[in-house]
Image (spheres, rainbow, N blue to C red):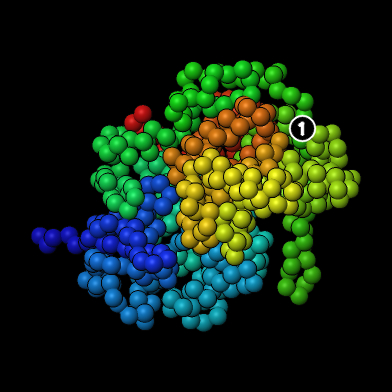
Amino acid sequence: MSERKPLLSVRDLKVAFKTDKNYKQVLHGVDLEVFPGETVAIVGESGSGKSTMMHAVINLLPGTGKITDGSVNWNGTELVGIGRRAMETIRGREIGLVPQDPMSNLNPVWSVGFQVEEAIKANGVAKSRAEVKKRAVEVLEQAGLQDAEKRMRQYPHQFSGGMKQRALIGIGLSANPQLLIADEPTSALDVTVQRVVLDHLAKLTGEMGTAVVFITHDLGLAAERAEKLVVMYRGNIVESGPSREILQNPQHPYTKRLVSAAPSLASRRIGSTADLPAAPTSSFDVSDLVRADENAKGAPVIEVEGLRKVYKLRKGNFGSEDFVAVNDATFSIRRGETMALVGESGSGKSTIAKMVLQLEKPTAGTIRIDGKDTSKLSGSELFKLRSKLQPVFQDPYGSLDPLVNIGNTIMEPLNIHNIGDRASRRERVLELLDQVALPRELATRYPNELSGGQRQRVAVARGLALKPEILVLDEAVSALDVLVQAQILDLLAELQRDLGLTYLFITHDLAVVRLIADRVCVMQQGKIVEQATTDEVFENPQQQYTRNLLDAIPGRSIELAK
């Protein structure tokens, strides 16, 4: 019987990035094998080298990075030192990639359909125009995008974050590659679409022998979907082996920290504005905390009534059609409370956030903040409102100016609102970097020099800069590894407890909702279909749609070591 051979074999791989004067090593001799049909998950904190390792495999390191030693063998072909043309015949056709950041990987001036079709043509999947279009619709449907043929005419800015990520998944799968590298492929997806996408990847693996490498911070996903788990820490692989075995019995101290920090549906609220004991010493040790008395909350600070938003979609040469993004949404948030908006991607969650922030005008309905109708505010009143109502956006790459360094990005709200002098502003920036667990030296770097998780922490820091009364957090922890996620959620809970902050928290991660929210609004196709306290929604959901969301959470049946 012949020995089973790996598709991909990485041996003693070392990678360095150029700094001001020399190179700094970021991968310290890592080994990895991926066999046909195998699913491997690579986990670790942001900046641990997960994406760097796989980008080195397909020769997509940034210009400042280079492989300094080691071997990457693909199906018998050595890829280290391979020519550009030879690599292009492999990348896309044999090794597909779903990149982490959908905004920076979709061209804003081209329609989504055009970009999918270009990838299909480049990979030689189809030749005639009709075949290319048919295949483009097919791969978008396979990636879980509804109304794919109609959506192909739209542009990236008309897609939610999750929809953009599904388009990239379609592109990555378009050539039916032997190996798919999926870099946080479902971080922006709601759990039901996530299940559709992951089921499709599992089907490819079973039917075609496609191997999949997940780069993920979701331990539930890793446990449920991957046969093998690779744990990375500071450029080294510290533990690897069967997924469930590692997650149920971790050996390395870092793996133990990852598992203990992972949120679950059994968790309880980590903070409250009621009279509570001091913050817990570890991120999710909440046995000594009790649910806050709902009557202790203040009067409504945000009141949304009959909110409606309709967009006009272009229909080629035949005019336009209405798309109802939000339909008659009504809710209120009391001072010091956290309201979570949950639902599938495209259900209208982010659209409501933009209207609350006055970045979009409602088609109908009323938004009142502190009792004032925001549609009737003067320019000066709106400017004053923005100092106490701050956003943390879903897409940190799109919301961070690539030409402005991190320190000045965080300082920008302080400059605009003329808070303090330059010295005090600099000190506030360093304080904020500490709060979101970023090294102070990152203040001089630029967004493209940071990982996706690091960029999202910068977005959180900027949102906190003015010490606002209300934060609108749109998927604010979706791209963070579990350790940093735990730190950020603890920080948000501590700030809320100490300062009485109010949060509108938009997320698709229901385990996080259980930890952070007092009440939940469940959205489906622009409508709020269920609204109750967090405990009521999780323990006794009234709508089948809500039950479907809960049932789709990866790793629910897997008991992690705690």
Residue 507: percent from the left, percent from the top? 59, 42
- Tell me what residue is drawn at x 42 percent, y 34 percent: 261
Q: Tell me if residue 470 comes above or below residue 153 in the rendering.
A: above
- Tell me what residue is drawn at x 77 percent, y 25 percent: 299
Q: Tell me if residue 164 comes above or below residue 277 in the rendering.
A: below
| Along the viewing direction, whichever of 185 and 418 lies nearer the viewer | 418
- Tell me what residue is drawn at x 80 percent, y 52 percent: 361
- Tell me what residue is drawn at x 34 percent, y 31 percent: 561
Amino acid marked by disc 1: Val
Res 50 visible: yes
Residue 78: percent from the left, percent from the top? 24, 72
Q: Is residue 87 left or right of residue 1?
A: right
Residue 311: percent from the left, percent from the top? 76, 58
| Along the viewing direction, whichever of 8 and 239 lies nearer the viewer | 239
Residue farthest to the left, as pictured: 1
The quadrant of the rendering that contains the N terminus is bottom left
Mark 1, other Cα within 10 Å: few <14 / some 14–19 / many ≥20: some
Residue marked by disc 1: 301
| Along the viewing direction, whichever of 289 and 426 lies nearer the viewer | 426
| Along the viewing direction, whichever of 20 and 195 lies nearer the viewer | 20
Q: Is residue 111 left or right of residue 300?
A: left
Q: Is residue 8 left or right of residue 474?
A: left
Q: Under tag 1, what secondary structure? A: strand
Residue 351: percent from the left, percent from the top? 70, 49
Res 149 visible: no
The quadrant of the rendering that contains the C terminus is top left
